Amino acid sequence: MLRYRKSGDQDGSSKRQEAIGDLFSLLGDMTLEMGRGREVVAPDWLSNAVAAGSEVALTSLAGLHLGASRNGEGLGEARPLLLEAAAKGYAPAQARLGVIALIGLGGTADPVEAAHWLAVAAEKGEKEAQSLFGMMLAAGVGVDRDLTEAERLLALAEEQGEDFAKKCRSTGQQTGLLPEVAAFLLGTVRVTAVIAAGLPDNADDVHFQRALIVLADQGDADACLFLSAKLLSDGDRAGALIWCRKAAAAGHGLAAVAAGFAAFANDNGPEDDAEAARWLDQASAQGQPLAQGLLGLMHVMGRGVERDMAKAGRLFEMAGQRMEAFSKLAGLAGSPDLQVCLDGTADLLAKVFARGIASGTLADGSLDFRREALELAAEGDASAQHYSGICLMHGNGVEADAAEAVRWFRLAAEQGHIPAQLDLGFAYDKGDGVSPDAEEAANWFRLAAEQGNAIAQWYLGLACEEGSGVDQDAAEAARWFRLAAEQGHSHAQMSLGLAYQEGSGVDQDAAEAARWFRLAGEQGEMLAQWFLGCAYQEGSGVDQDAAEAARWFRLAAEQGYALAQFRIGLAYQKGDGLNQDADEAVHWFRLSAEQGYLAAQLLLARAYEKGEGAEIDLAEAALWFRKAAEQGSKVAQFSLGCAYWKGDGIGPDPDEAARWLRMSGFLEEEELAALIASLDTEAQAPGMPEES
């Protein structure tokens, strides 16, 4: 409980109070660092200043009340003091009231009240208020969206050195997504404040991460998205997407956009299309312009939704940004190749809709996108020619005709259209609509690669590496891998890492290999995560670090890589970089074994045989010994033979025992014959050989 007292010096001079006024805020900050839950005695001079009605003292005393309690328990005492100071026009008090309302300290958040107080404080030059209110204006939180005023306030705050304003402006300008960036940052401010209010004084990043997970598990949408962003920055794309979807399911509009865009970009078939449409429909209903634009595109293409040009037109109108939304989406993905693709789509959409407006077919809903695109293609428009080729290649709304698709791809490619050159290269590579021709495929990949297309650069590098359609040339392969890798192409980063690891086309350099594996691994490249884990395990190009090795193995294992699952199982079994845990070891061995990895099958069988990390289950042990034995493991063959001999979970069956024991090769034929001849109920199985 907080105490403060007055002394006989009730009439301290106002000059003295003014001289120490600038110390009051510092005192409040110091109290927050000293610890909560302690009895804090306010000194005489602060008591006197409060009694005199000093707005600075009132605000500082409110800070003491808040600082001496957790989870806003001191708000009852602090709020009247802040209101009194705010009524006197004191901007810091007004700003604190705004923050309290914004984060919902001690109760429910009130964005409208937050906007009121922060607007007043911002006009008086309070940089934190300028930053927060600017973000609220950008995101339309508690106030009508006003991007012009938002930009003005954020610029003023940045000039005063406010970091959040700087981050919001720079990221917003880079991506063209200021409203979305502002909404995300406001969410992180709220979550950080809520967590910090309940943490102990000695809390560190680990405590914060645990509290963040707890809050996210409770369904807090901002916490889910915050956790998703942290996991993404740590290179865990799979985990990031899981929490992004949870944020979307909890109603977060930006998370729904991100989840929808991830499914759209993944483009692995109807299931991804349906998921993309579901999330984008949710975000569109919340007024997210990017979702409206992309959902409109899906209605144009008939992907995951019915093809409906009238609805697409309405969605583009609602988005307000129309075609510009697609370029922003590409910027969000950070992919130059996707930027080219979406820019081409936007260009084609703009032309088709212009024709629809001129003819009146857009207004009455009768616009036939494919027909208009085909007419544009016949007139020589490269984007339309490429689109027509895609429809024909995949049977999108028309009967599939690979040969006709290749014709359209060629017409567009000959005009320098990069995606068409790439698709024409794929057609020759796979033999879709033309006879397979590795040389022709390489020629078209080269044309796209020379225009800077990272995908084409990677494929051309593979062609040079394998001698497919071009002379085999490891150095030339590494050159193309590097060009693509420097654009952030994860497959190319992986390939370049392997080149450095093996000294293929470049000087062997373990440190460079590890660097490129890391860049690819941070983008979720499974094999790169595996190789980087191996590098840390062996100390190749990096300092040997079992814990870091386990971290990268886990990332690959969580994507389903059997070898990584086995290595994580070993790490748990041996306590190598992880706390020893037999149950976890069995869990990962099973995942690896179910994919047919022999060593995992053998160790899983041993676990069931010995009851290490699982209940003893000789039938299950025999099952996994058999799977490993059928893959040629001599130890497993011997163990299976012994199981048949003793009837441990299978059999007994002397013939099968003899077959597997003979197959293992661990017994001489004479020894095996003697065992078979002496079979009776008391016979002992031969001793177990050493595992190899």
Image (cartoon, rainbow, N blue to C red):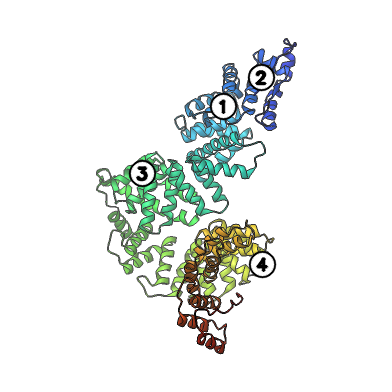
Q: Mark 3 points at which residue?
A: 316
Type of amino acid at the residue the image marks with label 1: Ala
Q: What residue does disc 4 label?
A: 509
Note whether 578 is above or below 656 in the view shown.
Answer: above
Nearer mark to the viewer, of 2 and 1: 2
Please identify the quadrant where the C terminus is shown.
Answer: bottom right
**Labelled pair 2, 3 in contact (Cβ < 8 Å):** no
**Residue 21: x %, y % from top left:** 70, 20
Q: Mark 1: which secondary structure?
A: helix
Q: Which corner quadrant holds the N terminus?
A: top right
Q: Where is residue 583 in the image (x, y as percent from the top left)?
A: 55, 58
Residue under circle 2? 57
Residue 302 x, y percent position in the rendering: 32, 53
Q: Nearer the viewer, mark 3 or mark 1?
A: 1
What's the distance in space between the residues labelled 2 and 1, CA to CA? 21 Å
Please, is residue 658 above or below residue 61 in the view?
below
Q: Distance between the residues labelled 4 and 3?
A: 51 Å
x and y, in percent, of residue 315 in the image: 34, 43
Query: Secondary structure under badge 3?
Result: helix
Residue occupying the far bottom of the picture: 670
For disc 1, the marked residue is 122
Gap in Å between the C-alphas at discs 2 and 3?
54 Å
Marks 3 and 1, Cα distance to the nearest angstrom?
35 Å
Specify which label sits upstream in the sequence, 3 or 1.
1
| Amino acid tagged 2 | Ala
Position of residue 134 in the picture relative to residue 293 (left or right): right
Q: Which of labels 2 and 4 is toward the front?
A: 2
Badge nearest the viewer, 4 or 3: 4
Nearer the observer: mark 4 or 1; the answer is 4
